[in-house]
Image (cartoon, rainbow, N blue to C red):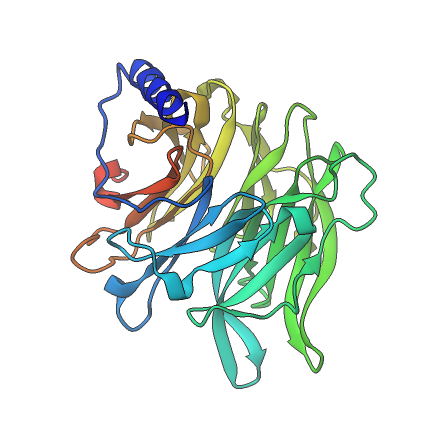
């Protein structure tokens, strides 16, 4: 039945893409066990060709899968036994103490109502089993975390996690936590509640432009919302845009940041395509068909990752328990 369903989805995708030529992936990963959802890219500082793509497998018996750039599962970097991990993000330069820094991945573990934090590439937990989020939520399912993005402040060098959830209030839907180490270990401190919500569906996809200190998130059936990521800059919404370019759900968001130009890449989920916007002006640029079906999450880097991805890498979830890897040049963002 699942195979027939997927064939049907592919047929639907083909129909939706009749005016968009398909840009074939360079690599399709091995399958997760249950339900692939959201990726994050770790760039190996010693050898970029040995970088890792992490991807969530969203299930009661879920996992954070690690893939090499050939799409093969790296078992000793994969985290199993998780309770519905949803979204994942990555940041560099988290201070463990005065002399030690590490890259980190953060992800939500929805059924345990936790935010998780691991050192990369050692894959060592830093969170003592997880940080509780959305304590004292009033709404049904308001304490079930979904989306997450990490922000490294250009002002203070602090690292924050911004977390979304299954349901929440019309204002203050997102919670922002400062991540830091002290004599007792790694801590997560709530520093603000912000972000409007239309009430139409949910908020899952979150992405942060570290360079400009801006957070974007998908109010799924309403618009892409834009706020300052720096807590000191306040909670006023900068803009709410893009709704006219989406068939239904606005989903995964990735930010491609070049030296003098930036792009917002957003999944047009039910159209099985991606919409590209100018990062500075929010202007719509174009729509692309990358071959994926019902994409939830995506990530991108403009850094060259060896001979296989010399122009950077775009990773997107596909609804067949896998992820597609495209050399970033195939998206023709700079043309």
Q: Position of residue 161 (x, y in %)?
A: 61, 56
Query: Could you say which is closer to the camera, residue 320 or residue 203?
Result: 320
Query: Could you say which is closer to the camera, residue 1 or residue 106?
Result: 1
Q: Quadrant of residue 219?
A: top right
Q: Position of residue 223 (x, y in %)?
A: 56, 27
Q: Quadrant of residue 107?
A: bottom right
Q: Quadrant of the C terminus?
A: top left
- Residue 212 visible? The answer is no
Q: Is residue 12 left or right of residue 88?
A: left
Task: Name above or below for residue 252 compared with residue 57.
Answer: above
Q: Position of residue 122 (x, y in %)?
A: 44, 72
Task: Name above or below for residue 156 compared with residue 323.
Answer: below
Q: Is residue 77 left or right of residue 233?
A: left
Q: Position of residue 281 (x, y in %)?
A: 45, 35
- Residue 42 visible? The answer is yes
Query: Could you say which is closer to the camera, residue 120 or residue 1?
Result: 1
């Amino acid at each position: 039945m699942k195979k027939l369903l997927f064939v049907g989805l592919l047929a639907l995708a083909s129909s939706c893409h009749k005016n968009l030529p398909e840009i074939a992936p360079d690599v399709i990963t091995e399958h997760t066990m249950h339900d692939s959802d959201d990726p994050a890219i770790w760039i190996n500082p010693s050898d970029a060709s040995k970088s890792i793509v992490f991807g969530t497998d969203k299930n009661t018996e879920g996992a954070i899968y690690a893939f090499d750039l050939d799409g093969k599962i790296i078992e000793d970097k994969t985290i199993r036994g998780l309770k519905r991990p949803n979204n994942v993000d990555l940041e560099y330069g988290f201070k463990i103490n005065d002399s030690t820094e590490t890259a980190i991945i953060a992800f939500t573990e929805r059924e345990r109502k936790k935010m998780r934090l691991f050192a990369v590439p050692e894959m060592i937990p830093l969170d003592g089993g997880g940080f509780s989020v959305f304590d004292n939520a009033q709404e049904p399912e308001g304490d079930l975390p979904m989306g997450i993005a990490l922000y490294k402040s250009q002002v203070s060098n602090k690292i924050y996690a911004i977390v979304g959830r299954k349901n929440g209030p019309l204002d203050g839907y997102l919670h922002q936590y400062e991540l830091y180490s002290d004599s007792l270990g790694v801590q997560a401190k709530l520093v603000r509640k912000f972000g409007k919500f239309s009430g139409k569906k949910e908020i899952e996809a979150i992405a942060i432009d570290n360079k400009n200190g801006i957070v974007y998130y998908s109010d799924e059936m309403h618009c892409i919302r834009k706020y300052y990521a720096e807590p000191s800059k306040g909670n006023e919404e900068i803009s709410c845009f893009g709704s006219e370019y989406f068939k239904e759900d606005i989903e995964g968001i990735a930010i491609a940041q070049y030296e003098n130009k930036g792009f917002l890449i957003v999944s047009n989920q039910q159209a099985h395509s991606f919409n590209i916007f100018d990062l500075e002006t929010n202007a719509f640029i174009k729509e692309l068909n990358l071959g994926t079906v019902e994409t939830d999450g995506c990530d991108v880097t403009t850094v060259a990752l060896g001979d296989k991805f010399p122009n950077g890498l775009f990773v997107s979830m596909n609804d067949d328990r896998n992820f597609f890897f495209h050399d970033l040049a195939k998206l023709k963002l700079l043309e």
